[in-house]
Amino acid sequence: MADDKKPEDTAGTAAESPETKAETAATETPAETEAPKAEEKAEAAPKADTVTDLADLGAIAGDAPDADAKAIANNPATPLRAQELDDQGRAYATGRRKDAVARVWIKPGKGTITINGRDQETYFARPTLRLILDQPFTITDRQGQYDVIATVRGGGLSGQAGAVKHGISQALTRYEPELRSTVKSAGFLTRDSRVVERKKYGKAKARKSFQFSKR
């Protein structure tokens, strides 16, 4: 009887051994296969340059800033616009404000301003109007360096002063293009679009109403 049981036991152990081997192989293979792959990827991946100090950053960047500085020194900046002068060496521009239109010529001189053949103090008697004309020269430090000849038509004295100022600003930037950024930042090159608001029907003026009477 003992001999009969021994073959069964050995057969049972022999039958169980392949299954257990398969289970152990299934549990062990993912970890064992992933580890070599991860090591291969780590070896194949390029090493990234890590910057931990300003000296490392300078070593990576190289001499690029010095090269840029040398290129800028060798090629000085030139004005974006060319000088625009007529046959007599004057710069011309047209200025507008409200209903007034001014034609302005400027040239180097002693700072005299002539409006419609008359001196500015005679044509613009109010000091505030003469200050308006002088604003473009004040912000550019060119007071007393240019003579201005202007003809202006339309509008009142305030609108004409604004038109001449606009024309002086435009002409000054055409005579000295490098001053354009200064004059433009002050807003003198922009045409002031503000005009009188039109009258509305049923009203005395643009906004003013007639006196209301209840009875």
Image (spheres, helix red, strand yellow):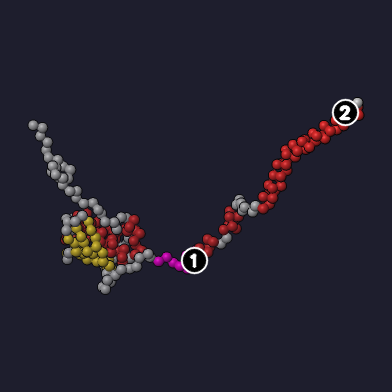
Residue 4: x and y in percent read: 89, 28
Q: Is 196 in the magenta?
A: no
Q: For this rendering, which residue is in front, 96 or 10? A: 10
Residue, x 52% and y 61% (percent of image)? 65
Res. 201 image quadrant? top left
Q: What stretch is highlighted in magenta?
A: 69-78
Residue neighbourhood size for the residue with mark 2, other residues' Cα within 10 Å, grouped as few (<14), some (14–19), many (≥20): few
Name the secondary structure under disc 1.
helix
Which residue is painted at 57% across and 58% down in the image? 61
Q: In which quarter of the image is residue 121?
A: bottom left
- Within-10-Å neighbours for mark 1: few <14, some 14–19, many 20+: few
The correct choice, above or below, for 173 with respect to 54 in the image is below
Q: Mark 1 points at which residue?
A: 71
The one nearer the camera, 14 or 74, is 14
Residue beneath the point at 88% across and 30% down? 6
Q: Which mark is residue 34?
A: none
Q: Is residue 78 above or below residue 98?
A: below
Snapshot quadrant of residue 122: bottom left
View extreme (bottom): residue: 87
**Residue 24 seen in the current view:** no
Among numbered discs 1 and 2, the one appearing first in the sequence: 2
Q: Disc 1 residue type?
A: Ala
Q: Quadrant of the N terminus?
A: top right
**Of helix, strand and loop, which mostly describes the magenta segment?**
helix
Which quarter of the figure is the C terminus placed in? top left
Say which amino acid is labelled 2: Lys
x then y, percent, for residue 2: 91, 27
**Circle 2 — which element?**
helix
Q: Determine which residue is flagged by label 2.
A: 5
Q: Is residue 95 visible?
A: yes
State left or right for residue 167 relative to residue 74.
left
